[in-house]
Structures are given as structure tokens and as C-alpha cells.
Amino acid sequence: MTIYYVATSGSNNASGSATEPFGSIQQALNSGLQPGDEVVVRAGTYQEAIYINDGGSAAGNVVLRAEEPGTVTIAPPSNSWNAISVDANYVTVSGFIVSNATGDGLEGNNVHHIEVLNNVFHGNGESGIQFNGSDFIKIDGNVTYDNASDGWYSGISVYQNRNITGDTSTDEFRTIISNNISYDNVTKTGDHTDGNGIIIDDFQSTQTSGFPSYDFPTLVENNLVYGNGGKGIQVVWSDGVTVRNNTAYHNNNDDLNVGTWRGEISNSQSSNNTFINNIAVADPGINSLNTAIDNTSYGNYTNDNVVWISNLTFNGQTGTASVRTDGNNDVPSTADGNLLGVDPGFADAPNDFRLSDGSVAIDAGSNAYGLPGADLDGLARAIGTVDMGAYEAGSTGAPTPTAPTPAEPTDPVPPTDTVEPVAPAEPTDTVEPVAPTEPTDTLDPVAPTEPTDTVEPVAPEGPDATESFNIWADATPEMAAASDTNPVTLGLEFTADEDASLEGLRLYVTEANSGLDSIDLWGADGTLLAHAQVKPAGGEGWQMLTFDEPVQLSAGETYVASYFTTSGGYSVSQGFFTGAEDKGPVSFGENAGVYSYGSESGFPDQTYLASNYWVDLVLTTGASGVEAEAPVQAETETQVQLEAETQVQVEAEAQVEAEAQVDAEVALPPLAANSIIGEAGVVTQNQADSDTWHSVTFENPLVDPSVVMGGMTGNGAQPYTVRVRDVTSDGFDYQIDEWDYLDGKHTTESISWLAVESGTHRLEDGRTITAGSTSVGDSWKAVSFDKGTFDHDPVVFGQSSSDGNASAVVDRIRSVTSDGFETCLFGEEGSEAQISSDAFDWIAVESGGSASAGSLAGTTGRMVNHKGSAVDFDGAFVNDAFVFMTELQTTNGADPATLRTTSVDEDMAMLAIVEEQSSDSEMNHIFEDAGYAGFDAAPIYGMSVELEDGFF
């Protein structure tokens, strides 16, 4: 065994001995390390990005350690990516403070037998600790805080474990995350999807095809997680995980986090997992959806064989279980020793999470699934019966080494020697599953859907019928037909503020909701009060469905009005019921939209993202009816009464008044059904020679379109780009362009095109899209968006749109912000031809949307290079004909290159960067951020938005 030493006072020309240390950590790591060798780093700050390329073997790890734990800081320069990149097997990293990396504090890809011990990771833009596609990982005794600020990352993240060793005989825990403290990891920019304390992510490999599910044993034990933006501990799409003796407190602090479920400890879409002796304390004051425990799933998936033993839940209200089980999954039972809705009695949370004397969690645990040898303090476990949580009360056993005290965040260290950035080889923390069996189209409420108090004439139902009150008048749902096709009951929870007669329900119905079967009225306790079978009329719009007899409502009582459909396809608007509202005869509170899944009508008692399912009431006030009593079972089908085609003037005035009160900065303008602001399509074409041009004709003429194109296939062996010219209101010409050192002929490819009217528009789902044109040559040119167009960085696509250059060129993008971007034309390296200024069209679109809704956009993060990376869509495109566009958003590599879509399916795509080879055969390319967008191949609807002019 050889020990190499590193000191800030050393020299890279030295021998690396104790008396002649190296001056950089990387120099020591590049010294031909063998199994059992150590690199010992002396106190100081090292301005390096570390690459561990030589590892050990089963005979011994290569060890990188601080000579005195907690005295060595690794702070990479700003032009690097990860602080520590582990690219070898059998490696131990111990005792460092790792801070201020643009990417991950430590990242390992496709590696095995790695130990990360007793480090502090803070202030890193992505995860503190990140492993992708790896196995046999031990993460113990670390502190991770203030990481994950730049998107979908977490304090500690282990993603898509794989059996890369081929070992099928080792049956003990192969991945262990233990004795860590992970706190204050909160997303501040980018996608607010994660920011978890600890995440075990997609061991089922649902997001990457071709890999088997990994279900070898994984242990998450003795960890303290608190104050994170996302969940404390999340197990998602992962099986075979034991979560034991952890403490989770007041996580889910990021109210912008779009994740479906908000448990302190969460088991989602995962089976064969065990949760035992954990303490989970939620804070619903941050978000009403925050719960202590989630055991949730979507679609037809059930979380099978999930064990909940001796866990404690609390949300500040004694007796409230604070458990969510969407998908008809098991609820933790008090019969199994679970203490639900009980204060754990911490000593001084959030400063001290040890148990105070008399805590109910003391001696309340179970040893049914094994015990840690020590608690988070390193003291002996099981003083009497084991306690719940990460700390054992009353233990005085000999301490073992614990994590170093977290250092205060420091300013980024100025860059020294340039180290080439390395970014994730795969996606890291991913978006938590958004259940397709729940309303999944996340859209802001559109102005017309604001409730209005309206008196509307309704055909008389009997001698006592008068004018009927309803809530929504002729408002239009934001999503008229959700893609969910599962049987479901959807309803509205409301309180009668005065005695009234409920004649029936108004529902917004489309052809997608063909299975509408029955309507119901329930008491607040789930007692069925009225029921009627119904047959809706065809077409789209509001329909009234009546009970056999009007049902009397009593002032002060709370009810749930609902309907059951076998087909899904319901109407929905998310983010609607965010506060209490008084509507005259009735009122409702937050999360008034309710639902439940099942093969027949059932009491709907679950909520999702404050959604409105557009269940309206038809009430008569001051009229007598049948008093609600249980049960009432109608046995005949009711007459479906269509709404009157015209509304009285008072209704229209009320609607106008309501719309005028909508906050213009939040709500979107109503979209005209005939507002075509663009079109998307796909052409299939080969290129017989470099002189032939092809044409596209728009289905509907546009006024002043900008056009961008991009390949959806990579059938040809050679790289290609697409050139556009002669853009008019009726269409444009294009050709497949190969680099000039090639023959100009190219095999058949599928090529996407996107045309959008110049100016700024609002898409149907509420996102912003803007388009324009300018000219650009071989120097970087700044393009500015109109003021106020975007709140966050959009996705930008560019296109050379004239034939001013005889040689092939490719446009590149960089410096994308909410204010604009920079672009430049590149020619091939081996050409001496001067690049002339070309006309240049561009389109920028707000990130978001979903494939299932027919439109999406996003960026990969800095993770795409020549090796290729997967992009998983949110949902799947339903239509066979859809457009997929890509464009690099960065220009980190200097060599001319194109972004190739090597394959694309309805729910994912594979992207790779292809360099041209006119000067050399080398094709390696540094990591870049790739932008992408997808649209159904069809006209694009939206509405123009007037903004202050920008400049180009």
C-alpha cells in the first residue's frame, strides 16, 4: 500500500511523500493508484474539480481522505461542473468539506463499491451526493445542506441502481444511506420538482428502457432530514427498500414544488418496502397538502407488500393521522404499533431532535426487521426496547465518529487552472410521479373559469320551482377532457348557508366523458343522501342532470355533490380552490374539489392540487323539497335537461364583472377558438443532391411566421442540419444540409417543423411562446425578448432561414435568460469559406406542459454529450403524429456540432451531440444543455399578448 500526501504548500513536481507532498489532489489521483493506496490531504482549501479515474478492487479500496476530517475544503472553480467525479470502482472518499460546485458535490456514474463517509456537502447547485446507475454504495455520516438550488436535485440522491457487477448472490443490503443529516436543500431556480433530503429514485428504471428493475436490498437508516424543499425521505418507483429509525421534520418547504404528494416520508409507486421506527412530523401550515406519510400510487398500480410498523406521525394536531394513501393503498395501522397523530416530544425542535423525557417514542419501536448498531450520535441502540427515530434516549454507549460540524458557506473560490466540466451522464433527480389517474394537466386557472354568482332560468321542476341558482354560469373549464380514462367519482364539497332545495347538478361534459353514469349527494360523513342514474346528451358543454325529486338542504350543514363516470375524460382546472369563498346560498373552503377511484360510485374524499372538477349545483332558495335523509336510491333514469342556449342579461353582466376582477398578472386571457398562432408538422424526405429544395405548405395561411426545423431521426451515417428559405404566409422551402466535406446526399429522415406567428402569444395551456427574426453571421449576436415576456429562462430554437451561405452552416445558442439569448453561425472547421450574414428565425417557448396534453417544452440540464442521453417526457403523446424539436442551449464546446435525435417515442427521446470531422476524426464533445419541445402535428391555437417592444 502506498500513501500519497497533498498539501497547499506542496508541488506537483514533488514525490508525493509525507515530506514532499503534491500541491494538488488531482496530481495524487493521477499517480497510478493501486488497490489499497491512499491519498491523504492536509488542511486547506483546494480550488480543484476532482476526477477519480483509478480505483481499487475487492482486495482494497483506493482511499481519498482528509488527514484531519473537517479541515479540508474542496471548492471547484466556477468553470467546472462537479466537485468530485467518481469514475472508478472500489473508492472511498472521507472527511472533506465540499462546496460551491455548479453541479453535484460528488457524483458517481455506473460505478460500484463506493463509500462516501463523514463529509460535509453544501452550497452545490445540484445534489450534494448523486449516484446514477450504480451498485454497492455506502453513504454514511455525511452532512448535506443548501444544495439543489438549481433544479431537480436533492441532498442525497441515488438514481436507477443497476446490477452492473452481475452479482446475484449477495442478499444483504447493497446500498446503505445511514447516519446522515440532510437539511435546507431547496430549489431556487429551474424546475421545482425535488429538493428532497434523501431520495431513492426509479430503481424500476421506468424512465430508461432496456434495463431490468433493480430490487436488491437497500437500507435508509438513522438519518435526520429537516427543512428541505421537497420530501424528507422519498422512495419512488423503487422496490426492496427498508427505511428504519429515521427522523423527518417540517420538510416540503418549497410551495412551488409541483410534486404530486408531499409526505415527510413517502412511498410512491413502489412495492416490497419496509418502513419501521420512523418519526415523521409535517407542517401543513406551509402547504395544506403536507402530510407525515404518503403511501401513494396511480394508474392501476398498487403498492404491494409495503410494511408499516412502529412509525409515529404528527402534523401539529393531536389525533390527526396525517397519512395519504392515494391509489387505494394500505394505511399504517395502530395495531402494528404505529402512533398516528401523536406529538413525539422532541427536546427542542428544530434545534435538537433528541427525545425528551417522557416522549411516547421512547421504547415504542420494534426489532422485527433488525436494528442499527448505534444511533445518529453513535451511541448504543436498544436501551430497553428500541426507540423510534434517529436518536436513542438514555444511551451512554461509547460514541463512534460522527459527521464533522458543518462549516459556514463560503464564497466561490476564483478559478485557477481550467478543468473541463463534467455533467451527469444520466438524468438525476426526476419529477415525482404525477398520477395520470389523477388530474395531471397542471395549468393556472383561466379567467373565464372564475366562479360567478348568476341567476339562470331553468325549466320548472314542479309547483315550487322558481329561479335556480348555480355557481359557474357559462364558465369554461381550463381542461375540458382530461386524459385519465379510469372510473372515478368527482365532486364538490360545500356548505349550505341557508335552507335550499337541490334540484340537480350541472356538469361540463364532453364526448370524452361518455361513461357518465350517476349523480349523488352525500353528507359530510359519507352518508349517501340522494342518487340518480343519468344519461347525458351528446356534444360538449354544460348539461343539467336532475334527481327524481328536489332534495332539501339545511343551513349550516356540509354536503358533497358528485358524479360517477366509467370513462374518465372529466373536466378539470388545477390550482382553483386555493381559498374559502362565499357564493350566497352556499360556500366552500380550500380544496373543495374532491374525488375517489373505484369501479362504482363512492364517497369522494381525496383532493389533488386544489382542483375544480366542475360540479355545479342547481338550487332553489326558499322552496320546499324532499328533506335529505339516508339512504335515497333512485331506480329510474332521470331526464337530462340541456342548458338554455341563451342566458339572461344579468348573467352576462355578472360574468363580465367577475372577469374584470381577475388579477391580470395571474389569470390568462380567454382564448378564441379560432386563434391559430402557428402550426407544427413532420416531413419525410431524402436529399438526392446539394441543389434540390423541397417545400412545405401550411394548412392555414399565417401572417408573418418564423420557422424552425430539426431532425427527428438519425438514419444516415453522416451528421446533417436543415436549411430553410423563402418563408411566406403560405409555407417555406427547405433542404437537408450535409457538411461540405461530405457528398451532399442524404438518406430519408423525418424532420420536424414549427411555424409561429411573429410576436408573443399565450398557448392554450397558459404557457408563453414568442417568435421573431433577425440576421446573424459568424459573430455572436444578442437577441432580446419583449419586456415581460418570460419570468424564467425559456427554451430557444433557431434557424438559418436564407441561402446566403454556399457552404453548410449551423446556428448555435448560448446565454439563454428570461431577457433574451445570443446566437452565432458556425461553419465546418476545415473550410476557409467566409460565413456571410443569414436571415435567422427564432422561437422561444416557456418550459412546462405535458406530452399527454399535446404540448411540452424543457431542457435537459448540462448532461448531453457525444455518448447520448435520454429525455423522458411528462406523460406520452396520444396522437401518433407529433413534432419533436431540439436545440442546444449552450455552447460549451468550441467545435462545430449538431444535436441529433437518435430515437424518439411517444414518451421519451434519445439525444446525442455529433461533431463534424472535416479537420480531425475526434468526435468527443463536452456536456451541453439541450432544449426540446413537442407539439401535436396540427395547427397551434393561442392568443396574442401585447407587450413592450424589445429590440434586435
Image (cartoon, rainbow, N blue to C red):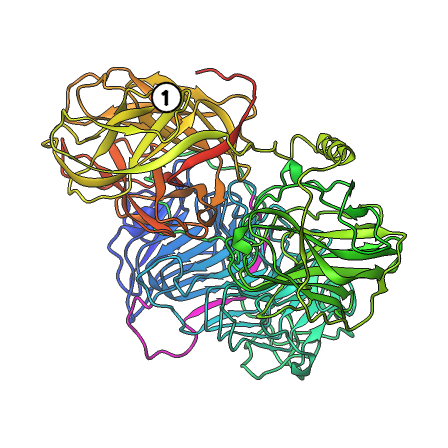
Q: Residue furthest left?
A: 743
Which x, y percent locates residue 612?
66, 50
Q: Nearer the viewer, residue 604 or 34?
A: 604
Mark yes or no: residue 136 visible. Answer: yes
- Check disc 1 and give the amino acid type: Ser
Q: Label 1, on which residue?
A: 729
- Provide residue 311's location: percent of width, then percent of height: 65, 74
Dot 1: element:
loop
Residue nearer the viewer, 570 or 925: 570
Quick one: 624 or 774, which is closer to the camera?
Answer: 624
**What secondary structure prevails in the magenta region?**
loop
Dividing the picture into quadrants, the one containing residue 827 is: top left
**In magenta segment, residue 172:** yes
Q: Residue at x 76, y 34 (%)?
A: 654
Is residue 510 magenta-colored? no
Image: magenta residue range: 163-187
Q: Position of residue 748 (x, y in %)?
A: 18, 40
Residue 248: image location, x then y, percent? 63, 63
